[in-house]
Image (cartoon, rainbow, N blue to C red):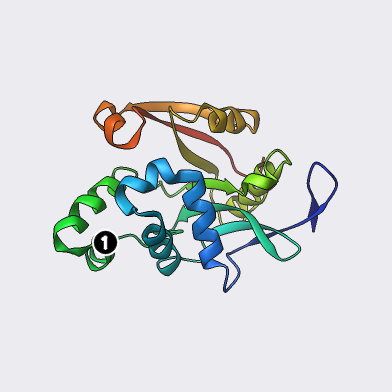
Amino acid sequence: MRTDKRGDPLDVRRGVPQGAEGRAAELYWEAFADKLGPALKPRARGVAFLAAHMNRDRAVCALRDGALVGLAGLQYEGRSLTRAGRREMIRAYGPLRGPYRYALLATFKEAPGRSELKLDGIAVDAAARGRGIGELLIEEVSELAAETGHSEITLDVVDSNPRARGLYERLGFTAVSTKRTPHLRRVMGFGAVTLMRRPAGG
């Protein structure tokens, strides 16, 4: 058990609790609607898709009084928080729209190297933000990375989210490279993706 910045108890654990897939999907959608929306909209359908195709062991979660208030999605050893392959997308969205929607999601799918544990993103309930939950989640992710033999944590941050980049920089992440994606600005609202990394266990 840990405490947030207000001193309130917070249960930070590995894995999405069974039965909390729907809530986890809702938090993820709230945090990444701009990124996920073009591929998975409308919202209700996208949230249902994420919940139904979730690898519960690829997350670190924060719970308050048993309720999920934050999570960090992880990618390593060939698996990530969500199973959103071409087949799943076609099954959910049809043979005409499925491939296009999958192509949008695949823009962000870049497998991490052997030494890397990739942070897919952090989502915190709006009412619980500003209480250090993101920092606590990253601390747990860092410990997990070290325990599983990964020397560093990596993540991607888009140029339309400077607040997230500022958080990552305060937590020891440094920018490695930036990929310009002007063709996506009209569709997804951002024009560049920056790769950041920090040592595991630090």
User: Which quadrant would residue 184 be assigned to in this image?
Assistant: top left
Q: Position of residue 118 (x, y in %)?
A: 48, 47
Label 1 sits on a secondary structure element that is helix
Q: x%, y% of residue 134?
A: 65, 43
Residue in the foreground of this view, choosing between 169 and 5: 5
| CA neighbours of label 1 inside 10 A, class few (<14), some (14 to 19), many (20+) | many
Quarter-wise, where is residue 49 in the image? bottom left
Q: At which x and y percent is residue 97?
A: 18, 56
Relative to the observer, which residue lies in front, 21 or 44?
44
Q: Amino acid at mark 1?
A: Met
Q: Is residue 191 left or right of residue 22?
A: left
Identify whether 60 is placed above or below 187. Answer: below
Residue extending furthest toward the bottom: 18
The image quarter containing residue 94 is: bottom left
- At x 29% / y 43%, what residue is drawn? 107
Task: Using the image, determine if residue 67 lies above or below residue 168.
Answer: below
Q: Is residue 109 visible?
A: no
Q: x, y percentage for residue 82?
A: 42, 60
Residue 50 drawn above or below residue 34: below
Residue that carries the numbered disc 1 in the rendered image? 89
